[in-house]
Image: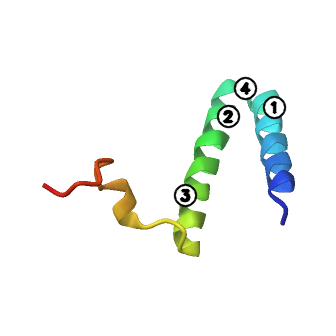
Amino acid sequence: MNMAVVGLIAGMALGFAGYFGGFGAFLLVAALGAVGFVVGRFLEGDLELGDFFRSRDSRRR
């Protein structure tokens, strides 16, 4: 699926949540979407669990 279509669907979902459920529902849908994105990248192999725990400094101490 094209990334533009995925962005369109995500934007529509956020819009519906904001319109029908208010700002709290908008934040909930946005947070769950971000979690789903990270889990999807992890399952595809594009993201490793160690990426969250390593420091930004590439030097080892």
Viewer-proximal residue among 31 and 55:
55
Q: Are marks 2 and 4 in contact (CB under 8 Å)?
A: yes
User: In this image, 50 relative to 42: left or right?
Assistant: left
Circle 3: residue type: Val
Crowding near the residue tagged with mark 4, few <14, some 14–19, many ≥20 C-alpha atoms within 10 Å: few
| Residue identifier under label 3 | 38
**Horizontal and vertical percent position of residue 10:** 78, 47
Q: Are marks 1 and 2 in contact (CB under 8 Å)?
A: yes
Mark nearer the viewer, 1 or 3: 3
Mark nearer the viewer, 3 or 4: 3
Distance between the alpha carbons at the discs numbered 1 and 3 = 26 Å
Upstream in sequence: badge 2 or badge 3: 2
Mark nearer the viewer, 2 or 3: 3
Distance between the alpha carbons at the discs numbered 1 and 2 = 8 Å
Image quadrant where residue 49 sits: bottom left
Image quadrant where residue 29 sits: top right
Q: Residue at x 30, y 55 (%)?
A: 53
Quarter occupied by the N terminus: bottom right
Q: Residue at the left extreme?
A: 61
Q: Are marks 2 and 3 in contact (CB under 8 Å)?
A: no
| Residue identifier under label 1 | 20
User: In this image, 45 relative to 51: left or right?
Assistant: right
Distance between the alpha carbons at the discs numbered 4 and 1 = 6 Å
Q: Secondary structure at mark 1?
A: helix
Quarter occupied by the C terminus: bottom left
Q: Are marks 1 and 3 in contact (CB under 8 Å)?
A: no
Q: Name the mark on residue 22.
A: 4
